Amino acid sequence: MPKKKTYPQRQMGKHEIIAKRILMALVTPLVIVATPFSTTPRYAKDLEEALDNLEDFFFPGPENFNEEKIRGSIYNLKSGGYIKYRTSKDKTKLHFELTEKGKRLVQSYKLDELNLSQQSKWDGKWRFVMFDIPEKSRYARDILRDKLENLGFFRIQQSVWVYPYACEKEIDFLAEFLYIKACVLIFTGKVNKDEELKVHFRKLGFNL
């Protein structure tokens, strides 16, 4: 597999770990069934019971997460605009889902974990990623370049990078996340004299 550029990793605190778990779990909206809600003062108690069920869903294993931290993360994510929940008309269910802000944060998690798998057999074709990103989007351009390098791409020109295996889906995701999809072109082709490329990727462990 290709060697990857390494960056200092900041350790996540327990609150961050809990919040990330909740957000990732809500990629698909979740419905929690509780005892029938009422319009009486018992409503607050019913809500607490529903949140207990939610905690069991997010953390079913033996992990040692304090219940207060879990509850605090749920409320903080809601108050921060990352998740939302509503009761059903019959007051028997709570519907939890991500807001647009929450979806964006989940996408950033996926970006950090973005990887490319090496296929068992190369088809002899090269995947080219070309981009022309305006100066006003320089930050996105720098992220794209760093990520391409980190994924093992070979730069043949300033804004032209090449890779031996299918990567269209991953690069599309990256460009869409950075709001530069219109500036990025991906295509597949052959190179007549590609020995330098092969040598580069073989050094990284690719089977070409």
Image (tube, rainbow, N blue to C red):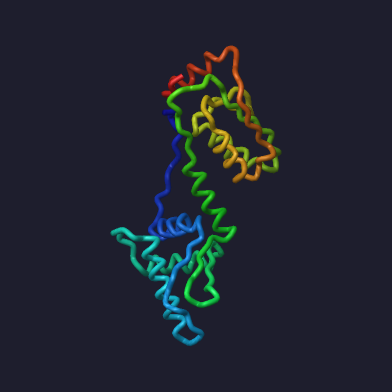
Residue depicted at 49% across the width and 44% down the height: 112
Taking the spot 60% from the left edge, 39% from the top edge, the residue there is 172
Is 156 left or right of 113, judged from the image as shown?
Answer: right
Percent position of residue 114, x then y: 49, 41
Q: Position of residue 5 (x, y in %)?
A: 46, 33
Left or right: 131 with respect to 10? right
Residue 127 placement: quadrant: top right
Q: Position of residue 194 (x, y in %)?
A: 55, 15
Residue farthest left in this picture: 62
Rendered view: 201 above or below 104? above
Q: Is residue 28 above or below residue 4?
A: below
Q: What is the residue that sits farthest to the front in this orientation?
A: 90
Residue depicted at x 51% and y 27%: 165
Q: Position of residue 205 (x, y in %)?
A: 41, 23
Q: Quadrant of the N terminus?
A: top left
In the rendered image, is residue 158 in sight? Answer: yes
Residue for point 56% across, 64% down: 81
Q: Which residue occupies the foreground of this view, 154 or 93?
A: 93
User: Is 82 left, or right, of 69 in this rendering?
Assistant: right
- Position of 12 relative to 74 (above/below): above
Q: Is residue 204 visible?
A: no
Q: Is residue 42 above or below residue 208?
A: below
**Closest to the observer: 10 or 110?**
110
Count of number-bearing discs: 0
